[in-house]
Amino acid sequence: MTAQRHGQIIAVDPEGIAEYKRLHAAVWPQVLEMISACNIRNYSIFLKEPENLLFAYFEYVGSDFEADMAKMAADPVTQDWWSRCMPLQRPLDTRKEGEWWAEAEEVFHHD
């Protein structure tokens, strides 16, 4: 199965950058296990300052993205993790309805 590549963008509160970095320097093991259990691989988050934008990239290797994302969203540990991260994030005004992180279109890829 070929991986589906995803790119996502969100802003981060300038006053929350240090906390966001601190959280992600030591992601809880249960959160990492859930990410893997939901068929996400090669997951990275990048910070662009001074614009204070986060860019996430991951590869989805499963067969039912919506079901795997629902599984992740239902996990109590993940919910607790998100409750710490989400207040630091600022969704883009231009995101599509239902998105928290705005999906970015892939316009080029080279292996």
Image (cartoon, rainbow, N blue to C red):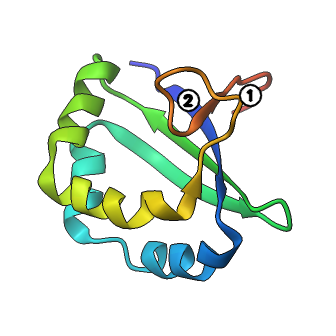
Asked whether 31 or 89 is in front, the reply is 89
Report x, y in % for residue 104.
68, 29
Give the structural element (helix, strand or loop) at label 2: strand
Report x, y in % for residue 98.
46, 24
Asked whether 109 or 74 is in front, the reply is 74
Left or right relative to 74: residue 13: right
Please tell me which of labels 1 and 2 falls first in the chain.
2
Q: CA distance from mark 1 to mark 2?
A: 9 Å
The residue that mark 2 highlights is 5
The residue that mark 1 highlights is 109
Left or right relative to 90: residue 69: left
Q: Residue at x 71, y 29 (%)?
A: 94
Q: Residue at x 55, y 77 (%)?
A: 21
Q: Which quarter of the figure is the N terminus placed in?
A: top left
Amino acid carrying label 2: it is: Arg
Amino acid carrying label 1: it is: His
Give the structural element (helix, strand or loop) at label 1: loop
Q: Residue at x 55, y 39 (%)?
A: 101
